[in-house]
Image: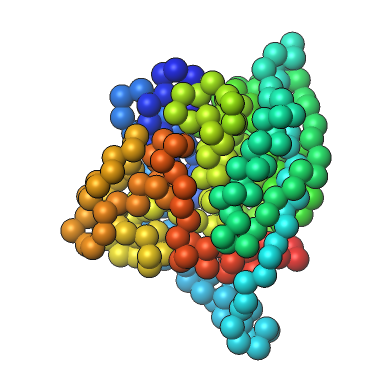
Amino acid sequence: MRMLKTVLAFGAIAAMTGCGPADEMEQVSEQQVTDIRTCAGADFTAEQVAQIENNFEVLKAQQAMQMGGTVHQMAVSIPVYVHIIKSATGAGGVTTTQINNQISVLNGAYASAGYSFFLAGTDTTNNGTWYTCTGGACESQMKSALHKGTASSLNLYTNNMGQGLLGWATFPWSYASSPSLDGVVILQSSLPGGTATNYNLGDTATHEVGHWMGLYHTFQGGCVSPGDSVSDTPDESSPASGCPTGRNTCSTAGNDPITNFMDYSYDSCMNTFSAGQNSRMTSMWNSYRAGK
């Protein structure tokens, strides 16, 4: 997330709702990228990735058998339920125009992967605790009260979380155990036209929805295989900030993917999902969300 004019870079760390590997929370730091969230920790460990990916491979194999071989990409239209959280007195929130523009940003970003988004509903809640929520009990309460739809519905919450945060998302493999917690929470000022300098073009939502679709950060695992478990995103030892063209932090071939939506560059520099990421999203969707 980002904090108005103090925002220069954002970082993240995986955490469960409360604390652990179910959500991905992004933070902005005025000085540098810092891997801090409400709970202590970091991105997924190698052991966690291995377990996640092993389970994923089993599901993919089962699905391929059920479908008689290759799993084909199909166009998917995702309903979006937007939950606008305001302060106890009704301050803050986002406009209808911002919501519509955010949906348009998502549609542009995910078109190449075969996904589109449409607004299925909005609601507004005045709640001072939820308005500044950064995870934990307030998140559970908020989502339990407001969540709508199924595993294939995107619940998007906007609030004014503090601590320099931009947003967080649950991963698809967490849905089965905690369906009401599924979704994405983003800083209200990160929507298109918001006041989060360098992060107000709507790509915080793009990035967080990427996690919701099953993508890691491009710098997951640093320069060590399997990295982000996508073969066509160059290895990256640490998050990028700003728009550092030509940055190359690993000895393996290819400059860092600073234009990728799953890095930490400014919104103005983010414009790409790789073919491998698109394929992973399809497999993740079919394994964890389709028909669930």
Q: Nearer the viewer, residue 179 or 19?
A: 179
Tell me if 258 is positioned left or right of 113 in this view: left
Q: Can see residue 142? A: no
Considering depth in this image, is 140 or 77 the residue closer to the camera?
A: 77
Q: Is residue 122 left or right of residue 271?
A: right
Q: From the image, which quarter does the C terminus lie in?
A: bottom right
Seen as rendered, the residue at the extreme top is 89
Look at 65% across and 58% down and name the residue there: 115
The way the protein has been coloured in the rendering is: rainbow
Residue at 70% x, 13% y is: 91
Q: Is residue 225 visible?
A: yes
- Above or below residue 17? Residue 195 is above
Q: Position of residue 156 (x, y in %)?
A: 67, 40
Which is nearer the eye, 149 or 108?
108
Residue drawn 59% across the image and 26% down it: 193
Seen from the viewer's position, the closer of residues 2 and 180 is: 2
The residue at 53%/38% (across/down) is 204
Furthest residue to the left? 251
**In which quadrant of the rendered view does residue 48 lie?**
bottom left
The quadrant where residue 65 appears: bottom right
**x%, y% of residue 139?**
64, 34
Could you tell me residue 277's position as x and y percent?
48, 62
User: Image quarter for residue 121?
Assistant: top right
Residue 192, given in percent of the width and then of the height, sits at 59, 31
State left or right for residue 161 relative to residue 141: left
Q: Is residue 79 left or right of residue 106?
A: right
Give the number of marks. 0
The image shows residue 86, relative to residue 255, as above or below, that is: above
